[in-house]
Amino acid sequence: MEIEKRALVIIPAFNEEGSLERVVRGVNTHLPQAHVLVVNDGSTDRTSEKAKASGATVLDLPFNLGIGGAMQAGYRYAYEKAYDIAIQVDADGQHDPEEIRKLLAALEVQKVDVAIGSRFIESSEYKGSIMRRIGIAIFSGVISTIVRQKITDPTSGFRASNRRAIQLFASNYPQDYPEPEVLILLHQCHLKMGEVPVGMSKRYFGESSITKIRSVYYMVKVLLAIFVDCFKKPPLLE
Amino acid sequence: MLIKVQIIVGVISLILLFVTFELIRKKRLREEYAILWLFTGVVVLLFSLWPEFFLSQFFVKITGIFYLSAVVLIAFSFLLLIVLHFSVVISKLTSQQKDLAQRYALLELELNKLKRRDPAPSNIPS
C-alpha cells in the first residue's frame, strides 16, 4: 500500500464497552497509519467514554439508528474527510485487526472497489450454529446468483472500500440488513467486489444479535429485503 | 329502515367533517392529510343525502352492491388509502430523521474539535 493513501477504520458500536478498547488497540497496533472512527450508535453504557479513552475519534449519534445508519454515518465522515480507503470492523472483536492488511492488499491486487473478509473460503476458528450456517449457505446461493459472482460470506461485516465505494455508501446505504443488501447495491452500481479468506474469532463479549429461534424469521426477512432490492431503482453515480 | 341508516351515516359523516375541520383550525393536522379525511367525510355525506342514486337499478347493476354495503366499502377504501399514505409519510420521515441524526453527529464532532483547538475565545470583546 502506498503511503499517501489515507485509511479510516470505522467501528460501529452499540453498547460494546466490554470489547471496544481491545479492538481499537488492536487496530492501532496492526495498522498504526490508519485513523480510527468509532460510531457510537446511541449506546446507553460507557461505550463513548471508553472509545475516547482509547484514543479513537468518536462520532456520537444522538439516538440509536441501527447498524445501517451507524455505518453510513461513518462512511459520510470518510467521504467528507477525503479518506481513500475505509475499513469496517465489528466492535465485538470477532474480526482480527491483523487481517485488515489482507483486505487492503485485495483492493490493490484484485482491483476491486470493495474487499470482503470471508470466513468460509478457508476453514477458520469460527463455528456458528447449524441454523446460522444453513442460513448463510442459502444467502450465499441467492446472492451469488443475483450478483453473478461467488460470494461465500454475504453477512460478513469485515470489509474495505475504496474512494468510489465510500462515495456510494455516503449517499446510499441499506438500512435494514446492510451486509447482504450492500452486495446487491454494489452489483446494481457496477462496482466490483472480491472476497478474501480471513479468520474470525468468537465474540469477546455478548451474544450475536441473531439467536437460534429467531434465525429462521431473520432469514425470511433478509431474503425478502434482497428480493425487494432487486427491483429498486439503482442510484445514479456521477 | 332506510331513513335510520341514512341518519346514522349522515351523523357519522358530519362528526368526521367537524372533527377534521377543528383539527385543521387548531393546526393539529396538516392540510396534506386533512384533504383525504375531508373527502371521505363528504363522500359518505353524499350517500346519506341522496340514497336514491345508490338505490337505483342503474347503480346496483353496474356495481352489484346495495346501499349500506356501498357506504362501508367506499369508506373502507378511503381508510385504506389514508393508512397507505401514512406508511409512505412515516418512511420518508424516518429517512429524513436518520439523515438529520448523522449530520448532527458529524457537526458535533467538528464543533468539539474546534472548541478543543481554541478553548477560550478570550479575545472576543463581550
Image: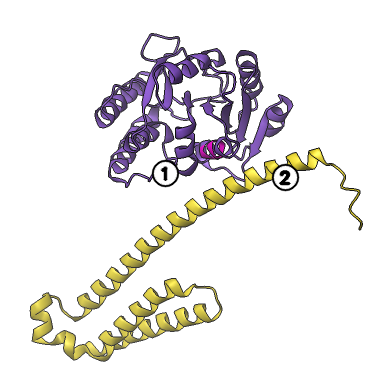
Residue A197 shows up from this direction: yes
Q: Which quadrant holds residue A131?
A: top left
Colour chain B is painted in: yellow
Q: Position of residue A112 (x, y in %)?
A: 40, 24
Question: Disc 2 designates what residue?
Answer: B111
Q: Residue at x 13, y 82 (%)?
A: B59
Q: Which quadrant holds residue B78?
A: bottom left
Say left or right for B31 vs A204. Answer: left
Graded by Cα atoms within 10 Å as few (under 14), some (14 to 19) or many (20 or more), the crowding at tag 1 reads: few
Tell me the amino acid under the disc marked 2.
Leu
- Give whichever of A163, B31 is nearer the camera: A163
Q: Nearer the viewer, mark 2 or mark 1?
A: 1
Q: Check if residue A79 falls in the magenta segment.
A: no
Q: Residue at x 48, y 30 (%)?
A: A209
Determine the chain carrying the residue at label 1: A
Q: Which stretch appears magenta?
A: A72-76
Residue A238: which disc? 1
